Amino acid sequence: FQPKLLAGRRVLITAGPTFEPIDPVRGITNHSSGKMGFALARAAQEAGAQVTLVAGPVHMPTPRGVARLDVQTARQMHAAVLPLAPQHDVFIATAAVADWRPDTTADQKIKKQGDSRVPTLALTENPDILAAVAALPQRPYCVGFAAESEQLLQHASEKRLRKNIPLIVGNLGPATFGRDDNALLLVDEQGHHDIPHADKLTLARALVREIAGRIGQPHTP
Ligand code: C5P
């Protein structure tokens, strides 16, 4: 029996990569599978929460009982999340949002020039969705993720403070994108501790317990 730790709570989750089009057939993206975000959506739903999942382009079935919105770009994800955020108690940002997008998107496929000239791609920074939600006056409890290749604790701690969020979760496993397992490092104002190596659904359930413990007693709607 799983206690309903998030009964009456509303949880908003971003998951997967974003896709930033260059032209109608090309774009910038990354290898995020969405597995961690989808596992968290399932775990939060099992814990009694009303869950909204905003997903980039992924090949994942929607967990039972979860409301899902599909987006492509970082700006679409930002536009979907911001108005929803104040109506939620918890926001978990697992999406691997592209940091930059092409300045302009060509209407037609960019053709190869016969003389081997190479087009240059001018980039613009994408909005930081997590930082924007954390800056809302009516903000949900915000949880960020940090994928770092070195000095995870230091970088995760700095990121937590920079984005002004109470909890950040570091990926301890090597190259977690697409894998079914991982280990997590939780960093909050009290300090840090690990959730040991396990499959992503087990980790998601453990993280849901951690979040439920931090936002207080379950309440009835
Ligand atoms: O700054 P960095 O991308 O390393 O931060 C990672 C965290 O911030 C993740 O929780 C990610 O979902 C979130 N993020 C975001 N919007 C961005 C970039 C990152 O929500 N544009």
Image (tube, grey):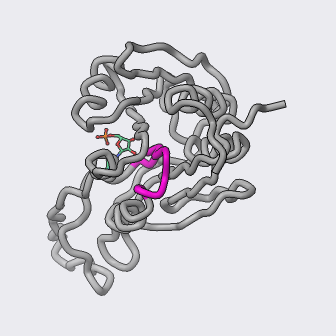
- Residue 150 colored in magenta in the image: no
Residue at 15% over, 70% down: 117
Side (left or right) of 9 relative to 127: right
In terms of depth relative to the viewer, which is nearer, 48 or 66?
48
Residue at 66% over, 24% down: 198
Side (left or right) of 6 relative to 126: right
Residue at 46% over, 22% down: 186
Residue at 63% over, 36% down: 218
- Residue 93 colored in magenta in the image: yes
Q: In the displayed structure, would residue 127 be above or below residue 157?
A: below
**Residue 15 can be seen in this image:** no
Q: Residue extending furthest front?
A: 220
In the image, the segment drawn in magenta is: 85-96
Side (left or right) of 160 relative to 95: left
Side (left or right) of 46 relative to 166: right
Q: Residue extending furthest bottom?
A: 108
* Ligand 1, image quadrant it occupies: top left
